[in-house]
Amino acid sequence: MKGTLFIQSEYSLLESTLRLDDLFLNAKNHGYDFLALSDTNNLYAAYKFFRYAKKYPDIKPIIGLRLEIYHLDVKSSLLFYAKNQKGYQSLLILSSMVMLNDEKRLELDAILPFTSDLIVVTPGYLSDIDQAILNNDLNQAKKRLQSYQQAFNEFYLGLSVQSFQLEMKVAPAMYQIAEDSNVLLLPIHQTAYLEKKDARARDALIKIEDPKNERFDQSNLSFMSYNDLQDAFFDYPFVFENLEKVFKQVEAIELDRNFDLPSVGLKEGVSSKDYLTDLCMIGLKKRLANDQITHYEPYLSRLKYELSVIDQMGYNDYFLVVYDFVRYAKTSQIMVGPGRGSAAGSLVSYTLGITNVDPLKYDLLFERFLNPERISMPDIDLDFPDDKRDQVINYVKEKYGSNRVVSITTFGTFAYRSSIRDICRVLGYSPQETNRIVKIATTDKETTNKNVIEVLELAKQIEGLPRHTGTHAAGIIISNEDLRYIIPLQKGATLYQSQFEQSDLEQMGLLKIDFLGIRNLQTINNVLELVKSQKQMDIDINKIPLDDKKTFDLLSKADTLGVFQLESSGMRNVLYKLKPQEFEDIVAVLALFRPGPMDNIDEYIKRRHEKTYLEIDPSIDHILKSTYGFIVYQEQIMTIANTFAGYSLAEADLLRRGVSKKDHEILNKEREKFIKKSIENHRSVEIATKIYDYIVKFADYGFNRSHSVAYAIVAYQMAYLKANHFEQFISVLLTSVISNETQIKDYISEARQRKVKILPPNINESDDTFKPTKLGIFYPLSGIKGIGTQTVRVITNEREKGIFTSYDDFKKRMTAQLSDKIIEALIFSGALDVFGLNKQTLYENRKEVMDLYALVVSDIKSKTYDEYDLAFLIEKEKETLGFNLIMTPLMMFQGVIKKNKLKLLEDIVETDKTVKTIGYIAKTKVITTKNNKTMAFISVTDGNMTHEMTVFPEIYEAYGPILSRKDYMVFECNIQNYQGFKLILSKLYEIQGENNE
């Protein structure tokens, strides 16, 4: 048997550049019979290694692990290899033990119970035995060898000749010790890169992880041919006989098997099939009664069909598991999204309350979700408010056990640009030199500079290698078995985490469910609570009318800033042109607003307004009528194949998947099948060819209608709340982006446009959220720089004893609890303006109580001071809030505004024809027209409001040089209402002084 031990793959993070595909291809070319994976501490690559071996059946995969072990207070490395299935489970446990340990430290005694089915080998120079020999302490080397012989059932010495020192000093002594102790010697060649030329890239990885790392000089860690390996061990040829003798006993290990789905724990005698059926029947009756649907038969027929497919595919327990935690969420008053992805096309999901989309009402197809002809696990992804997601996951963990519910690891890889920066840092380049090299690399400039070429070559070698691990944003594995014996684990934030990534786990057949934390659901929930407390209106968001006039007025005006999926400038432009009039318009626009189908939007809108559509053939025109002749949804492809060519919907789903890949061979194969089935369905070849070509044309563009409907519901719900309860909506929205100054300013501008006042923080009113009142919306105390949640709690707790009646009252009650820095922030944010004193008086008197507090003075007279100048106040407010809320620089131009009768940005209305306003340019986007002329789009703000302006080429030519300035200027504009409200710049004036232009 030709094999090699101590192979470290790319998943020995920052230790190896050896990619698995290169490893197996070269092993095949060199005639190897087995490869032994030996990554450090982890088994990240174990399943991938196993799957690669399936592609190379002549190469036996031996899964192993390099662990650092503490024995007799000395750190050493050992290699552990699985002899059989039980040995593989032992590796899982050992890897989990070390990866769950913060210090990555394992004691020898702790691992011994798990080593009976493992082959243990010393790894060469990393072994304490080799180190003892290097230190001329043969007695210590023998002592440690004997302790290992006593500890392990099957222990061998690894002989390494990878460096001159190892070959000349260690190898002879190791040979003698092995002879004396009757231990077999095995050839050890640590492999960490493919070819000798890759050594520098591997050295760079070592330095990236630890710039101070000075590793032992290893002259050759490349993957050697078997002949070269034999030549390296010329003086010890018998080690290869030993290697074959030891490793031919290793049994094949199987990592793929059928896993039972988790069980929710039913009463004895109750089957999951019967329980699921009963739940669905009960749920269907409730749904139909609530929706006042009387045509029961289509629903019952569809439900029976879905249940039969689910049972046939063995997924009854899957649906019960999801139903169980969704029910927990709802009974715990945790909002659950209406659906996500193709699961919204399932009536079973709807009757169980997993989704809130009626698939019959919206013409959604079950086979798009679960296809009996395509065996794969159902994919139900759930949306929860992002502040409640962990609560639901914790329920699942408590129900099934922490060893059965784990998060999923992800791998961050080296991107090319970051690789260049890392290599430059390792080689000692300055930041300026690094930037220059990055620029050369990213602009495709050729270079003859040898140093730059070296950097770029090294960067290319490490590009794409795993650099670090992360956590999958949503995925959770739920198992019916203890996962410690199925997959390797590591430490996660609140759960154990799999070492295998998502693709490995899904291929193994484990159940993955995505629990997504969605900010928009939290926003909806918080708005509903605020509306209930302030307006005494208890709104069931799932029962709001889908034809609300205010909502569609808002959508038609594209007033959708802050609305889920609909707030980008591009989307708002589409909405303004489309003028949505019904819910289906929202569904369509979500499907169309993507690269590809976006090209059809203008024609779609034209047909939508003219109520016309392109006729393809009478046999399918009714399918495309609702989308005016365009194939917008994947389900339309399936319905066409079903109606025209006689496909079953399951077959039609396979067609949809096939044509979307745009593979020439697949397209021809599907064409033949489509035409053949069409002929069998009494259709002509000519029409069949025409329709197939039309399907192929739009196959890439088609979107999952189930997902589009579900997300259109969320978008509509937010639009409804914004249209009908704006103050509550904008308050919650502002709170949700409190750490994002750009978004806060955008939303404040939106509020002011609607004449809703945003008031500064108020020590007697504000808390940790934006608070709507009759006076306006108070800015939160937690939005002030340097004031955290704990400080806000201290203030509000004191305030519960009574509001602060004066500045002196505030100082008496709060000075001992608040630092001088926090009081200063409260002053300049405007939070203490309620006491009727100017800011300099507040500031100069802030310490007075500190000096007298011990005397328990009951009445303190504050000295009065003149107010600070305006420029200082503007700067201090910006310092404390991050931007100017009330004290804007605009206040310095009152003379200019009055003299020139300027209109403030917030006062501009659509009915104006021309307007002169004041502000400064916050953003400029310069573009080149088709006629090769330069124009720009600018964002103009005055600190309170922001408006977009268009600068056409002739105006840009006149004013281009001053468009990059941040100074306040006067803008003269024409107002255009075609395809959206637009300000077209016509003239621009610089302000020379406070009272003149």
Image: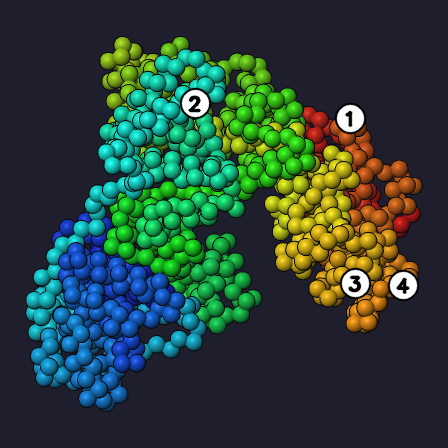
Which residue is labeled 3 in the image?
A: 812
The nearer-to-camera label among 1 and 3 is 3
Is tag 1's residue or tag 3's residue first in the polypeptide sequence? 3
The nearer-to-camera label among 4 and 1 is 4
The residue located at (84%, 67%) in the rendering is 857
Q: What is the C-alpha distance between the residues marked 1 and 2? A: 50 Å
Is tag 3's residue or tag 2's residue first in the polypeptide sequence? 2
- Seen from the viewer's position, the closer of residues 758 and 813 is 813
Q: Looking at the rendering, in which quadrant would you find the N terminus?
A: bottom left
Residue 861's tag is 4
Residue 286's tag is 2
Disc 4 residue type? Lys
Are the residues at dot 3 and dot 4 in contact (C-beta closer than 8 Å)? no
Disc 2 residue type? Lys
- Seen from the viewer's position, the closer of residues 497 and 175 is 497
Asked whether residue 221 appears in the rendered view, the answer is no
Relative to 634, 787 lies left or right:
right
Disc 3 residue type? Lys
Disc 1 residue type? Thr
Is tag 2's residue or tag 4's residue first in the polypeptide sequence? 2
Considering the numbered disc 2 on the image, is that residue within a helix, a strand or a loop?
A: helix
Is tag 3's residue or tag 4's residue first in the polypeptide sequence? 3
Asked whether residue 462 appears in the rendered view, the answer is yes
Residue 911's tag is 1
Image location of residue 934, percent across then percent down: 66, 40
Query: How is the model colour-coded?
Result: rainbow
Neighbours of disc 4 within 10 Å: few (<14), some (14-19), many (20+): few
Q: Quadrant of residue 3?
A: bottom left
